[in-house]
Amino acid sequence: MDSPAGQPAPRAAVVRVLLVLALVTAAYLPTFGAGFVWDDDDNVTENQTLRTASGLAKIWSEPLANQQFYPLTHTSFWLQYQLHGLDPLPYHLLNVLLHAGVALLLWRLLRLLSVPGPWLAAAVFAVHPVHVESVAWITERKNVLSGVFYLATALAFLKWAGLASKLRGPDHGAQPDHGAPPRFRAGYLLALLFFVCALASKTVTCTLPAALLIILGWKKPPAWKSSALALLPFFAVGAVAGLATSWIEKNHLNITWSTPWLDRCLIAGRAFFFYLGKLVWPSELVFIYPRWQIDPTSAWQYLFPFAVLLVAIMAFVLRRRIGWTPLVALGYYAVTLAPAMGFFTLAYHRFSYVQDHFDYLASMGPLALGTAGLSVFGNWLVKRRPRISPVALPALAGLLLVALTVRSAIQCRPFHDYESLFRHTLAGNPTAALAHHNLAVLLGRTGRTDEALLHYREAIRLAPTEPQVYDNLGGLLLATGRFSEATEARSTAARMLPGSANTRYQLGLAFLQSSRPAQAIAAWDDALGIRPNWTRVERLIAGTYASAPEVRDGKKAVAYAEAACSHTKRNFAACFEVLASAYTADGRVSDAKEAARRATALVPSATRGVPDKDDP
């Protein structure tokens, strides 16, 4: 039973909240026994910024300290690491709890907007299988955390804008004007603070001001024009965050390609309907979808963007008969999905143009529209057909939620562990080169060499221009004693990445283990040309000159070893160990003894840490 203000009675509201929590728990129960999967190593298990207080400072002050600059998300990881270490259960529990919070905030927002069937929309959102990727994958904490602040921003701003007073009458809420009491100005600042938190969790939330502008134009609360102007600071902050993320994507994640604008429009049109289709019929969900072949000369590919325009035009033309709500929902969907639709180049686009977690926030519009339509139609049907039991519609809604919950629980299973995720991916998409590569790396590390080599070969066949595949294949071949094949694989990787010092470092290791010290030194010299003063490489060159008969040269060994000692401020034992070998090779016995003595004295400091984090 609802109260006179149109809100659920307190007892009914509590029941509905508990029901949402129960549905979310049932849907994500399999994740409570899951572990870490892809990218969780970079973000959690091997993320050094989570270990110390100085790491926390780096999370906020160094944009390139982590894979992406989402400082609030990584702060949540930092806090959990301090409390729980690397036990995956608390990480999964918090993701599920945050997702439940997003669903409840969505219910609150839809009630504020007087959208029919708001609880059903929130419940469907809570257990929709498309959202499993955002919740079951620890790395996607950024989605659920940003979702909480995203909706909190919307609620705070719309209340400040007087939308509550517009919908509930003159005795509720207040209107935003320059003479508003301080508590209402504080409401605006609170909304701005929530928005900054959303951006610090994931910058895809930068589209929120445009979504709020659409809502203001739709509902037209008191003084809505001045409220729209008040969004300018939100647009500015969002633009800065979006540009910063774009720069990091391009430079930190090595994006070296550019997609023509016509191709981007074709991708966007197709993505629009792809995501809608998965919301309507969430079957065949996989972690990596096949990457579309975009061809501007193919006429049928233009059907997708033209269909988007046609849908928008039809919704506008029919607005007097069906209302503005469908146009608003589709506009919200397009605006919110825009950063991931293909208009902007993302690192992930090397593998696929779509991924389920891109649809997390945008899905709120179509899901709310669909459940509102069902609610309105159901109420109309009951009035027109008195014989239909009033219990029938809630029962059908319950069946829908149970079906979605079961489907989500099943979809959680691939996220149990790394191997399950990529085997499930390959079962649904055998052409996923990234899945073949990642599975090959895992199999190689666990001693299943023959199967690993099969997946490496398939990854190369599917993606022959991915240098990391050749580099990792070279490492496995080295470990199994196939030295000539290993050097060939790593030489290919080096040719593909002419500016990578690490690739040349790895190539040098392959040459050295293949008993080709001259080529190893040449590769390492190239690495130093790209990354000067790399002490690990300087030590390797010094040691090779000191010990390999084919290239033995004591003076060169001493020069490289002394450089390594200098670059580590002469407080790293390993540098003095190689310096001792270099002096010995150069016939300087007394100097060698002194260097060895210094190395022995420095052993305790070596165990406390190393000046260069890449030089253990």
Image (cartoon, rainbow, N blue to C red):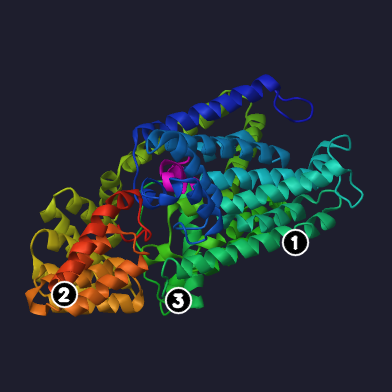
Q: Residue at x 83, y 43 (%)?
A: 184
Decide: marks 2, 1 in contact (CB < 8 A)? no
Q: Which residues are magenta?
A: 128-142
Q: Position of residue 5 (x, y in %)?
A: 79, 30
Q: If you read the primary sequence from the N terminus, does the residue marked by circle 2 or circle 1 appear first? A: 1
Q: Is residue 79 left or right of residue 237?
A: left
Residue indicated by mark 3: 258
Q: Position of residue 152 (x, y in %)?
A: 66, 43
Asked which secondary structure carries label 3, the reply is loop
- Amino acid type at mark 1: Leu
Q: Quadrant of the N terminus?
A: top right
**Magenta highlight on residue 130:** yes
Residue indicated by mark 2: 545
Q: Residue at x 55, y 54 (%)?
A: 60
Q: If you read the primary sequence from the N terminus, does the residue marked by circle 2 or circle 3 appear first? A: 3
Q: Position of residue 28 (x, y in %)?
A: 42, 34
Asked which secondary structure carries label 2, the reply is helix
- Amino acid type at mark 2: Tyr
Quadrant position of residue 535: bottom left
